[in-house]
Image (spheres, coloured by chain):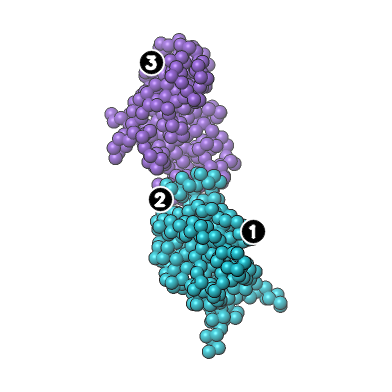
Chain colours: A purple, B cyan
Amino acid sequence: MDKILEVKGLSQVYGKGCDLCFASTGPEFETNICPHCGSIVALHDLSFDLYKGEILGIMGESGSGKSTAVKCLYFDQMPVSGSALFFDDSGQKPLFKLNPAQRRSLRNHRFGMVYQNPNLGLNFDISAGGNIAERLLMSQVMNYSEIRERARELLARTEVLTERMDELPKNFSGGMQQRVQIAKALATRPPLLLLDEVTTGLDLSVQAKILDLILEIQSELNTAMIVVTHDLGVIRLLAGRTLVMKYGRVIERGLTDQILEDPQHAYTQQLVASAL
Amino acid sequence: MSNGINFAFLDEYAKREIRRSVIKAICIPGYQVPYSSREMPMGRGFGTGGLQLTLALIGADDTLKVIDQGSDDSVNAVNLRKFIEMTCPGIDTTTHLQEATLIQSRHRIPEQALRADQILVLQVPYPDALVIVEPSEDKRKIMHGEADYSRLLVKLYEDIVKFDEITISHRYPTRINGHYIIDPSPIPRYDVPKLHNSEALILFGAGREKKIYAVPPHCLAEPLAFDDVPFRIEDFTDSHGERRACKLCASQTSFLDEFIDQQGERVYQCSDSDFCEQQQELAHG
């Protein structure tokens, strides 16, 4: 299988940071706040590989650094250290060494991001179709009817009523907003999709439909995905491999079945046992 | 000068700074060059950007024409002309386009083609076309640098969705030399194609926003549009499908102003008064 992403030693600190930050935080200290300088170690030494068409789950409680990881990969923030190599068709790209224009181009053309809050991923002042058009226009599609056609296709694919494509997303239900966000992320057929808590806050039947949609997309387009969630059900359904995070560190990693059936780390055991 | 005011009101250092900014603006077509924008004896927003450009460029051997919305006689034009005449002894002023070497205008580009030896200065209220989609100037600067105009194009897309056509009537975003998109000041769409491959140098001055930018001669200027929804200018055809004519000079090619006359009738008249008069003189032989 072809590798698509190789992340090595990714670390992120919020605050001014000091030399002792990494040494004095983590699961063994039961904190991610550095006692010496008060900085928050959101992420430390995260490494993983992702292969084409694979879904990798990142699981952990609130504040464990899972969202920070995908935000770094999507250039929403720059990590304090670490590297990530993206294997594009045209060659390897060291993500954190690119200039802003290259970063923007990767973000617009090769990556897709779906946030937990549709507010972050969608522009609520323009129509659902316009949101998708924005991504197409970023990739220099300059034909109006072609843009309309592609937007309609994508919305149909994600089961949003195409009659409502010219409506503002704020008139939509949460589940529909999430679908529009997925359609937007898919507009440029990215090889890598980042999903940050996409089903959190939706009711169960809508959750199931969105998860179905994600699986269909994966098998259809062979998109590699990183799924961030605290929901064991989502992980069980989607992810082939899973990382379990706590206090910014990976405490357990392996095949999803293995982790859910035979958790090794005390925290994972507690997590699996507490699932309803 | 006897009253202690320098020729063209501005001190020589101020003029030099503006000229330097103008040169930079010409070198990077469409790029908004920041400059200091001096205090002028009139409120910002009354054409101080254009005025400072004019004052920095004018010499005693220049002939100046000042236009406000096509007319030489409206308040803004008259006052600016008077001010420049007062502070620049020795210059000539004219209302005839052909005689002018320097033309300062507000909201219109003259009807007739400009020559290579003429400079057109346009007064600009809002220099940045991106201001409608991004409030932060910092971010707009990055967007311009990376030619990231997708959000502006989405605005056009939304217009077509809602109204079946692009509804921007003036300040039509125009891409200069294949990169920067400018706000070409509140000229009507009719005037936008005149920016393209112009013989004359066209300068834009925004006094309040402290920006100078330029469309140099023979430079690409493409109004934003989609491949299958092209840019179009104002439509002056009447209900019978005929192009309306100016009521004074009968021209059927000029940009027309619409107003209601004493009898309550709707009448049309050339917006460019100088062009209209010349057409009338031609007709009367």
Numbered tag placed on residue A141 in the rendering: 2
Subunit under mark 3: A
Task: Give the quarter of the image for residue A82.
Answer: top left
- Which of discs 1 and 2 lies nearer the camera? The answer is 1
Q: Work out whether residue B81 or residue A199 is closer to the camera in this orientation and state it.
A: B81
For label 3, count other residues whose C-alpha is less than 10 Å away and answer few (under 14), some (14-19) or many (20+): few
Which dot marks residue B43?
1
Residue drawn 47% across the image and 68% down it? B119
Is disc 1 placed on a helix, strand or loop?
loop
* Label of residue A113 in the image: none
Kind of residue indicated by mark 3: Gln
Question: Is any part of residue B1 visible from this angle?
Answer: yes
Compared to B254, does B121 lie above or below?
above
In the displayed structure image, the side of residue A10 where residue B125 appears, left or right? right
Residue drawn at the location 48% of the way across and 62% of the way down? B203
Instruction: Identify which residue, B269 or B104, lies in the foreground.
Output: B104
Q: Nearer the viewer, residue B170 or B200?
A: B200
Q: Which mark is residue A258?
A: 3
Cα gap from disc 1 to disc 2, whole angstroms: 44 Å
Work out which residue is located at the far bottom of the displayed protein and give it: B285
